[in-house]
């Protein structure tokens, strides 16, 4: 273990931590410790840590902004890798522009860059707090628009450090999912296509969506976004509300009184609290509506 720590410290220096609390790296503010936590600032570093993990027979997990994630109380064995690269480039053509952005940039930052350049297509997604890497992996969406609507291609790295490019079809986008859940590839950067628009109207729309989020979502408490996946025949949050679960809590994990589709951390919630609350919600919805509801948030780590 000392040799592992020494090598990691030599390569990552101030960007390496041992026994790092994952509660510091998730929007839920919940989670045990990761054995090792590193932040990569280049593709060379990412390639190195992937090979190192294999050499040491250590599992690894790629972390985005931790906004759609519940880390269990037992923490994460192995290495958590957070990609820090967030550079971008714009190629402007006559009727549209290509914007190529590194995986570590947040969607909010990307939407701001697009608006400053008079590019429309990201307004609906501007309030999603995740990174580009996480947004692509989950095919993030809001207000009728998803990542699949703007993505052209992506550059990726496999676990051996080889780099390849994939086209839109190879992303295999679905509802809150993509090929990145199973193909073993790590997103390095993606290219999106945006059209030109009025800078004033773009920024106005972004403000409207931000205001709507603040009014409807419990942003005042730590949470991981929508807890359950949407279903076609009836809004999930509506079923949870009609099951009388608004405000229902286990420990400090509570069904939001503002929006029943969210579980919030009222202070010292544990992952056990959240998962027990999830089970109760699923049970109540099944009993009242005969409807199975699935988690949208990702659960990982040890109990």
Image (cartoon, rainbow, N blue to C red):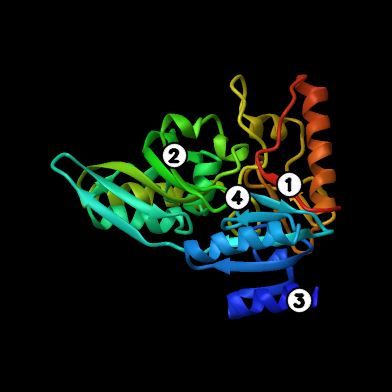
Q: Of discs 3 and 2, which sits in the foreground? A: 3
The CA span between labels 1 and 2 is 22 Å
Q: Is residue 194 left or right of residue 95?
A: right
Label for residue 159? 4
Label for residue 3? 3
Which of the 4 image quarters holds residue 222?
Answer: bottom right
Q: Give the percent coordinates (x, y) of residue 81.
A: 62, 61
Which of the 4 image quarters holds residue 53?
Answer: bottom right
Label 1: element kind? strand
Is residue 30 at all visible to an observer of this figure?
no
The CA span between labels 1 and 4 is 22 Å
Label 2: element kind? helix
Q: Earlier in the sequence, mark 4 or mark 2?
A: 2
Q: Nearer the viewer, residue 240 or 190?
A: 190
Q: Is residue 4 above or below residue 126?
A: below
Is residue 234 at all visible to an observer of this figure?
yes
Q: Give the percent coordinates (x, y) of residue 193.
A: 30, 41
The residue drawn where x is 56% and y is 44% is 185
Label 4: element kind? loop
Label 3: element kind? helix
Seen as rendered, the residue at the extreme left is: 94
The residue drawn where x is 86% and y is 53% is 303
Q: Are marks 3 and 4 in contact (CB under 8 Å)?
A: no
The residue drawn where x is 67% and y is 37% is 228
The CA span between labels 3 and 2 is 42 Å
What residue would you read off at disc 1? 299
The CA span between labels 1 and 3 is 31 Å
Q: Earlier in the sequence, mark 1 or mark 4?
A: 4
Label for residue 147? 2
């Amino acid at each position: 273990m000392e040799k592992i720590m020494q090598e990691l410290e030599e390569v990552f220096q101030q960007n390496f931590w041992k026994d790092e609390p994952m509660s510091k790296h998730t929007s839920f503010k919940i989670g045990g410790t990761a054995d090792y936590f590193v932040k990569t600032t280049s593709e060379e570093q990412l390639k190195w840590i992937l090979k190192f993990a294999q050499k040491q027979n250590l599992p690894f997990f790629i972390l985005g902004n931790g906004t759609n994630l519940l880390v269990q109380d037992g923490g994460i064995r192995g290495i958590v890798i957070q990609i820090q690269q967030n550079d971008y480039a714009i190629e402007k053509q006559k009727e549209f522009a290509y914007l190529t952005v590194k995986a570590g940039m947040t969607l909010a930052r990307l939407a701001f860059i697009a608006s400053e350049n008079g590019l429309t297509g990201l307004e609906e997604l501007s309030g999603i707090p995740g990174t580009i890497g996480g947004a692509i992996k989950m095919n993030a969406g809001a207000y009728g628009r998803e990542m699949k609507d703007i993505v052209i291609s992506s550059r990726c790295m496999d676990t051996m450090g080889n780099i390849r490019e994939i086209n839109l079809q190879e992303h295999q986008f679905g509802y809150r999912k993509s090929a990145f859940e199973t193909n073993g590839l790590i997103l390095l950067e993606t290219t999106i296509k945006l059209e030109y628009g009025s800078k004033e109207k773009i920024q106005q729309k972004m403000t409207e969506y931000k205001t709507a989020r603040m009014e409807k979502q419990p942003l005042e408490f730590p949470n991981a976004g929508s807890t359950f996946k949407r279903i076609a025949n009836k809004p999930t949050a509506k079923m949870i509300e009609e099951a009388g679960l608004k405000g229902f809590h286990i420990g400090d994990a509570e069904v939001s009184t503002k929006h029943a589709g969210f579980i919030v951390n009222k202070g010292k919630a544990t992952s056990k609290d959240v998962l027990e609350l999830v089970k109760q919600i699923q049970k109540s919805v099944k009993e009242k509506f005969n409807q199975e509801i699935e988690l949208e948030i990702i659960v990982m780590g040890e109990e």
